[in-house]
């Protein structure tokens, strides 16, 4: 399904809220995706603040208790969920076309009028603290935490644990959540995308009616963050956890941002390295052919900030060093020889084809448009995307892979305690 720029209506309310609407007549439903630039990037020295504040949004408003909110959604047969992340807090939901106005009113309550009742905050806090404790004893999560501390300097959002710090979570009070919400959950940092069986003008009017009273906050900007310092030689550290049988490793570097000029070559390089098919060259060689890993893949975290570009693997501790050597060998091979013609053709076909599949649903279209708004890609981005992918050259991919250092990487390992 093509999504032409002309088919997307974009409005900006006086308070700065951006509303995008795309009609899909006959679909019989409406999907809504909202992005608020209010994520853990604003935690500063309190990792877990945005996560607790965002999770608690669905636990009661000034007008309804958490149960009343759930009952209202159940009565509509609708959904509404809030997911706090590193850079944004995402709101997703779906409803019947006739119920869009009511759904938007509920979403407005959640975003504009959260109550942060102490009993519900305690409930959410308990869930997040439990999750943090469980993750701290999991080798996969422990290796990621260690990598973040090694690759990013203190004070950088990517250096902090995504699930929050247990001590910070335990100390946060409802007033801390209110202050975070008041400062960062603001309309001029928010985009709302509506896709479905609706009239675009009516949908925009409904959104304006529900959100017009939301007062604008200070101009939005990313906080200043310290620049990562690349290591001059391999930076390696290992921790041990009791009672474990598997070792998990994270080997990588600092990648690129979503809006950087080298994003597309780096994205394709990552796809070839550890995503495409059986998890790319790394998955094919390290896991499938050599059998040294339970899982092995690469991942590029490119957002408003440059995040990690890492290879992750779970291995038998006896195979740990061999697995590291095999991973480095695959990276070096792609950097030296570049992709084959077949690999490059497969990557291009996958990227264009997977977008087409994504745009077959209202939810997929809404998510794509939300990303376009978040990264200011232009409403014609989906029309330009195939040409962008086709324009990624072999040489640009090789250059991107060469920025993944095989002589000065960061390696974090979480392994069982020696017997």
Image (cartoon, rainbow, N blue to C red):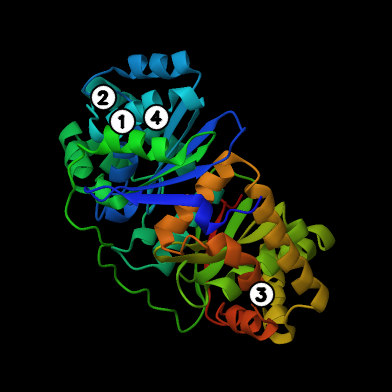
Q: Residues under labels 1 and 3: Cα distance?
A: 47 Å
Label 2 environment density (alpha carbons within 10 Å; few <14, some 14–19, many ≥20): many
Counting other residues with Cα less than 10 Å from the Cα at mark 1, is it few (<14), some (14-19), or many (20 or more)? Answer: many
Task: Pinpoint residue 405: horizontal percent, then vertical percent.
Answer: 56, 80
Where is 201 relative to 285, above or below? above
Please tell me which of labels 1 and 4 falls first in the chain.
1
**For the point 44% across and 50% down, which residue is it?**
9
Within 10 Å of disc 4 (Cα), the crowding (few <14, some 14-19, many 20+) is: few
Q: Earlier in the sequence, mark 2 or mark 4?
A: 2
- Residue at label 4? 127
Q: Which sits in the foreground, 221 or 236?
A: 221
- Which numbered marker is on residue 61? 2
Identify the mark nearer the N-term, 3 or 4.
4
Gap in Å between the C-alphas at discs 2 and 4?
20 Å
Camera-side residue: 127 or 307? 307
Residue 85 visible in the displayed image:
yes
Q: Which residue is mark 1?
A: 110
394 in relation to 228, above or below: below
Compute the Cα span from label 3 to label 4: 38 Å
Q: Residues within 10 Å of mark 3 (few under 14, many from 20)?
A: many
Figure quadrant of residue 291? bottom right
Q: Secondary structure at mark 2?
A: loop
Q: Height in image: 34 above or below 86?
A: above
Q: Is residue 292 visible from the viewing direction of this image? A: no
SS under mark 4:
helix
Identify the residue position indicated by label 3 in the image: 328
Which marked residue is nearer to the observer: mark 1 or mark 4? 1
The residue sitting at 37% across, 40% down in the picture is 204
Of the two numbered discs 2 and 4 in the rendering, the one whose residue sits closer to the viewer: 2
Taking the image as shown, residue 332 lies to the left or right of residue 198, namely: right
């Amino acid at each position: 399904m093509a999504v032409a720029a002309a088919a997307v209506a974009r409005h900006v309310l006086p308070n700065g809220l951006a509303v995008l609407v795309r009609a899909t007549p006959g679909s019989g439903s409406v999907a809504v995706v909202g992005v608020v630039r209010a994520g853990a990037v604003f935690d500063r020295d309190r990792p877990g603040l945005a996560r607790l504040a965002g999770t608690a949004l669905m636990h009661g408003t000034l007008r309804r208790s958490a149960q009343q909110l759930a009952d209202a959604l159940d009565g509509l047969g609708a959904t509404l969920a809030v997911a706090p992340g590193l850079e944004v807090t995402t709101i997703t939901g779906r409803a019947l076309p006739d119920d869009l106005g009511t759904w938007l009113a509920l979403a407005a309550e959640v975003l504009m009028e959260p109550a942060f009742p102490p009993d519900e905050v305690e409930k959410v806090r308990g869930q997040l603290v439990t999750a943090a404790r469980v993750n701290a004893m999991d080798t996969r999560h422990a290796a990621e935490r260690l990598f973040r501390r090694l690759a990013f300097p203190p004070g950088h959002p990517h250096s902090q644990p995504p699930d929050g710090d247990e001590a910070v979570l335990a100390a946060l009070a409802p007033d801390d959540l209110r202050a975070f919400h008041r400062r960062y959950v603001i309309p001029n940092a928010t985009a709302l995308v509506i896709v479905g069986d609706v009239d675009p003008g009516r949908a925009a009017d409904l959104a304006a009616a529900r959100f017009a009273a939301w007062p604008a906050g200070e101009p939005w900007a990313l906080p200043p963050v310290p620049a990562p310092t690349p290591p001059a030689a391999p930076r390696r550290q290992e921790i041990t956890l009791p009672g474990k049988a598997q070792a998990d490793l994270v080997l990588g570097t600092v990648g690129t941002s979503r809006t950087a000029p080298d994003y597309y070559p780096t994205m394709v390089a990552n796809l070839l390295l550890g995503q495409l098919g059986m998890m790319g060259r790394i998955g094919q060689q390290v896991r499938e052919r050599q059998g040294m890993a339970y899982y092995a893949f690469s991942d590029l975290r490119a957002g408003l900030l440059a995040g990690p570009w890492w290879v992750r693997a779970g291995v038998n501790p006896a195979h740990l060093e061999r697995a590291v050597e095999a991973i480095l060998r695959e990276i070096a091979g792609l950097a030296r020889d570049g992709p084959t013609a077949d690999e490059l053709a497969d990557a291009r076909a996958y990227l264009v084809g997977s977008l087409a599949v994504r745009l077959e649903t209202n939810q997929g279209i809404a998510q794509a448009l939300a990303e376009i708004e978040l990264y200011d890609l232009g409403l014609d981005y989906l029309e330009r995307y195939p040409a962008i992918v086709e324009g990624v050259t072999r040489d640009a991919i090789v250059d991107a892979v060469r920025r993944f250092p095989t002589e000065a990487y960061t390696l974090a390992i979480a392994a069982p305690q020696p017997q």
